[in-house]
Image: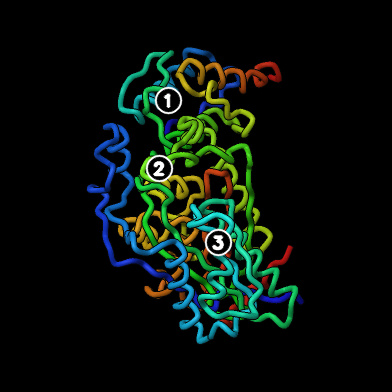
């Protein structure tokens, strides 16, 4: 039998500094339509701290996850860092910096990324693979520090990004079992959103969409089709029906994006997602971990309940995670 | 959402009327056949999905990724032509 995979601990680090979206730096320089779109997102405020880098956010969340799991850095068999949107320096390794910072000398260490908000999924796939392949490896740390690459935190017409770190300890047992992971990509959209940065001062960096009608139409409808197919396939191959899923946790882009997913899949996104969107904005790959953590804290995931975690990215990538709460869960884990 | 149109042969006036009613109800304004609601900035992702879902349900067709050329959907007139083309085989088969 293949090795089970579970989240032993999930931890987040939110900076204390609060930025009201209505007063975002740079918002006044936008056109009326852009400002109105921003105001309609359902995001009241984000956390921001210019003194904390993406690495700092990831490292603090990682320390908390280790403590919550009752582990030390010496227990880590591997570290998988999800790359920051913009590296602090070129040529260096943020992944091995985290290894050194934690003192996890024996951990197999590397980074993954390239899928925007979906980049948590390849990290979990790597963690699952490591646990399955090496019986001597017991715990994998997955971490990411989310910080927008540009001074203007608003990405028209999509979301407002905040600062935040999240980390998970992936082990063979834990309070949240990972039953299945599915992911698809379509490289036709690889540069739909981009930041031109070479030979430009950082203050002039801006997230730009090369084709807003294409984003709002073609990618939207393709996302509907992809999510529907992925969702149907995920349930079928695990022998589940829609009514067997107790909770749906999404990435946090906007209220409109939540409604889009709800209509596309005929589901309800958990209220914790709306609450986190309102007070933290978008945190990239960390959104679903934050929402899972919030749902756990609120007692929304009782033993035996199942949740689907949904992520999508305009690069374009889509992924679903099927998880079950409780160490004594009974659903068999699906392996490809 | 209106009653699905299951007629074997769809006519341009009927499809135009049904699409116009949907667009007017959802965009809050009447549009001429050649008004480009994408260029006018009236379309977001949620509306795009609702528009395609309406067309699929109303005319019992499936919009595939290959159909997602924005030119098929950007005006009332083009959307009408797309619907008529996708359903043209019904009359031939009848």
Q: Residues within 10 Å of mark 2 (few under 14, many from 20)?
A: few
Task: Pick the residue in front: A267 or A101.
Answer: A101
Secondary structure of the residue carrying tag 3 is: strand
Q: Chain of mark 3?
A: A
Instruction: Name the residue that disc number 3 marks.
Output: A82
- Identify the residue shown where x is 53% and y is 71%: A98
Left or right of A314 on screen, residue A205: left
Q: How many marks?
A: 3
Relative height, residue B5 to residue A310 (above, below): above
Task: Pick the residue in front: A143 or B48.
Answer: A143
Instruction: Name the residue that disc number 1 marks.
Output: B38
**Where's residue A329, x and y in %?**
59, 78
Which of labels 3 and 2 is toward the front?
2
Instruction: Name the residue that disc number 2 marks.
Output: A201
Q: Chain of mark 1?
A: B
Q: Do the residues bearing badges 2 and 1 touch, measured as CB atoms within 8 Å? A: no
Q: Residues within 10 Å of mark 3 (few under 14, many from 20)?
A: many
Q: Quadrant of the C terminus of chain B?
A: top right
**Where's residue A154, x and y in %?**
35, 45
Relative height, residue A269 to residue A302 (above, below): above
Colouring used for the render: rainbow
């Amino acid at each position: 039998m293949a090795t089970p995979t579970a989240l032993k601990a999930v931890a987040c680090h939110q900076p204390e500094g609060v930025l009201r979206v209505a007063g975002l730096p740079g918002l006044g320089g936008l056109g009326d339509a852009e400002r109105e779109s921003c105001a309609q997102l359902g995001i009241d405020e984000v956390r921001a701290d210019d003194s904390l880098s993406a690495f700092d956010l990831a490292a603090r969340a990682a320390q908390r996850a280790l403590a919550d799991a009752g582990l030390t850095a010496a227990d880590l068999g591997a570290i998988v860092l999800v790359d920051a949107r913009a590296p602090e320096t070129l040529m260096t390794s943020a992944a091995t910096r985290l290894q050194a910072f934690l003192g996890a000398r024996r951990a197999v260490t590397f980074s993954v990324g390239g899928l925007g908000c979906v980049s948590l999924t390849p990290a979990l796939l790597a963690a699952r693979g490591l646990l399955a392949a090496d019986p001597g490896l017991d715990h994998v740390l997955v971490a990411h520090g989310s910080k927008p690459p540009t001074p203007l935190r608003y990405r028209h017409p999509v979301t407002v990004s905040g600062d935040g770190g999240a980390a998970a300890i992936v082990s063979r047992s834990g309070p949240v079992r990972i039953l299945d992971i599915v992911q698809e990509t379509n490289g036709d959209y690889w540069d739909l959103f981009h930041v031109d940065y070479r030979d430009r001062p950082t203050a002039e960096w801006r997230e730009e969409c090369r084709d807003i009608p294409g984003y709002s139409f073609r990618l939207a409808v393709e996302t509907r089709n992809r999510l529907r197919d992925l969702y149907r396939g995920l349930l079928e191959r695990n022998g589940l029906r829609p009514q067997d899923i107790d909770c749906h946790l999404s990435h946090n882009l906007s209220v409109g994006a939540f409604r889009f997913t709800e209509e596309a899949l005929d589901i309800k996104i958990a209220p914790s997602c709306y609450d986190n969107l309102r007070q933290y904005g978008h945190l990239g790959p960390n959104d679903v971990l934050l929402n899972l953590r919030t749902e756990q804290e609120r007692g929304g995931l009782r033993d035996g309940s199942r949740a689907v975690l949904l992520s999508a990215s305009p690069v374009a990538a889509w992924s679903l995670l099927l998880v079950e709460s409780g160490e004594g869960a009974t659903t068999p884990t699906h392996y490809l | 959402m209106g009653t699905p149109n299951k007629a074997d042969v769809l006519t341009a006036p009927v499809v135009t009327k049904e699409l116009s009613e949907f667009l007017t109800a959802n965009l809050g304004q009447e549009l001429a056949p050649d008004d480009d609601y994408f260029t006018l900035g009236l379309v977001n992702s949620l509306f795009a999905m609702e528009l395609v879902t309406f067309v699929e349900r109303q005319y019992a067709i499936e919009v595939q990724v290959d159909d997602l050329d924005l030119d098929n959907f950007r005006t009332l007139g083009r959307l009408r032509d797309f619907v008529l083309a996708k359903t043209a085989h019904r009359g031939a088969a009848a």
